[in-house]
Image: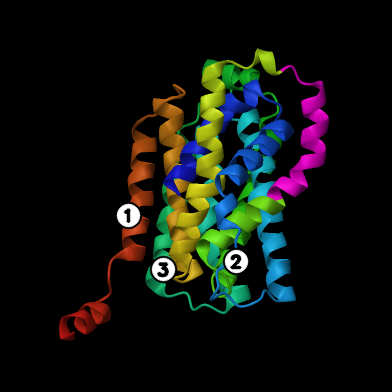
Amino acid sequence: MSLVGSYVALSKPLAAALPVLLLTWLRFGIGGLAMLHWLRKPADEPPMTAQTRRLLFLESLLGNFLFTLCMVYGVSLTSAVSAGVTMAAIPAVVALMSWAFLGERIGARLWAAVACAALGIALLALARPALGSPEAASAAAAHPQAWLGQLLLLGAVLCEAAYSVIGKKLTGALGPKRITALINLWGFALSTPAGLYVAWRFDFNTVPAATWLLLVFYALAACMWTVWLWMTGLKRVPAAQGGVFTVMLPVSAALVGVWVLGEPLDGIQLLALAIALAGVLLATLPTRLALRVGSRR
C-alpha cells in the first residue's frame, strides 16, 4: 500500500505529460510484458471455475481499470494530499464489504483501527486554507474542477475496497502471481481500444526521457509488485484486517506529494499521519490470546 500511495502521487506528473487513457494502456502493456512468465498455469493448480473467471474479470475491471481511471483523473484535478484525504475511507469501506460479502467478523479492536485510519487522514482536511483566503483562491484557480476530482477519488475508494474483498476470494482458488498476471491481462484488453485510438493521434516526441523512466516504475509498481504483494498477504490475513493496511496508501500519497511534488504539510497533517499509523499498529499487534498460544508452542 505504501507503493500504491507513491504511484498515486506520482501519477500527477504522468497525467500532465500523457493522456490518461494512453497512460492506462501503456501501464498495462509494460506490466504485461514483465509478467508473461506468470501466466503459465502451475501443475498443481485446479482448473478455473466459471465463478473464478467472473471474479478475475471483476477484479480487473474494478481494481485495475476503473480504479486507475478514477484515481489518475481525480489526482490530476485535485492534488496528492487531497487524494490522501479522500482515500481515508478505504479501510472502513473494506471492513464493511468484508462483513457484508465474506461474512468476516469485525472485532472491536479492528473497528478502532479503522476509526484511527479514517480519523487520522481526515484531519488533513482541517489543514486546508480557510474559505475566502488568498491561499484558498489560489487553490481554486489551480484546481477549478476539484469537486469532480473528489467524486472520482470517491469512486476510486469503492473500486479499491472491492478489489480487496474480491482478491480475498480469488486467493482461495489461484496463486498470487497468476492472479496478478491474469487481472493485468484483462486490464490491458479493457484499455486497448481507447489506448490505441489516443496513441494514433498522440505525438510521443513531446514526452521527455525522464517521464518514460517514471512510467516504467509506475507500471511495474502498479501492475506487478503491489498486486503480487497484496495477494500474497491476503492469503494469510482476513480481508478486513488487510483493509486497515490501505491506510498506507493515503499516508504515502500525502508524503510523496509533500517531498517530491512540493505540496505543503503542517502540524495538523503530521498529527493526522501519526493517528493513521496508530491504526495499523492496533490492527497488527498480537492479542493476549495469540501471545499465550505462541508461548505454549
Tell me whether circle 3 and circle 1 mark residues in contact (CB < 8 Å): no
SS of the residue under disc 1: helix
The residue type indicated by label 1 comes to: Ala
User: Which element carries disc 3, helix, strand or loop?
Assistant: helix
Q: Which amino acid is tagged 3?
A: Leu
Which residue carries the number 2 mark?
Answer: 41
**194 over 111 or under it: above or below:** above
In the picture of the structure, the residue carrying the numbered disc 1 is: 278
**Residue interval drawn in magenta:** 187-203
- Marking on residue 152: none
Secondary structure under the numbered disc 2 in the rendered image: loop
Disc 3 or 1, which lies upstream in sequence? 3
In primary-sequence order, the first of circles 2 and 3 is 2
Which of the two discs, 1 and 2, sits closer to the camera? 2
Q: Main secondary structure of the magenta part?
A: helix
- Left or right placement of residue 253 versus residue 159 in this view: left
Q: Position of residue 73 (x, y in %)?
A: 67, 34
Q: Which mark is residue 110?
A: 3
Amino acid bearing label 2: Lys
Residue 100 seen in the current view = yes
| Residue located at (49% from left, 67% from top) | 240
Q: CA distance from mark 2 to mark 3?
A: 36 Å
Q: Is residue 194 magenta?
A: yes
Between 270 and 240, which is closer to the camera in this rendering? 240
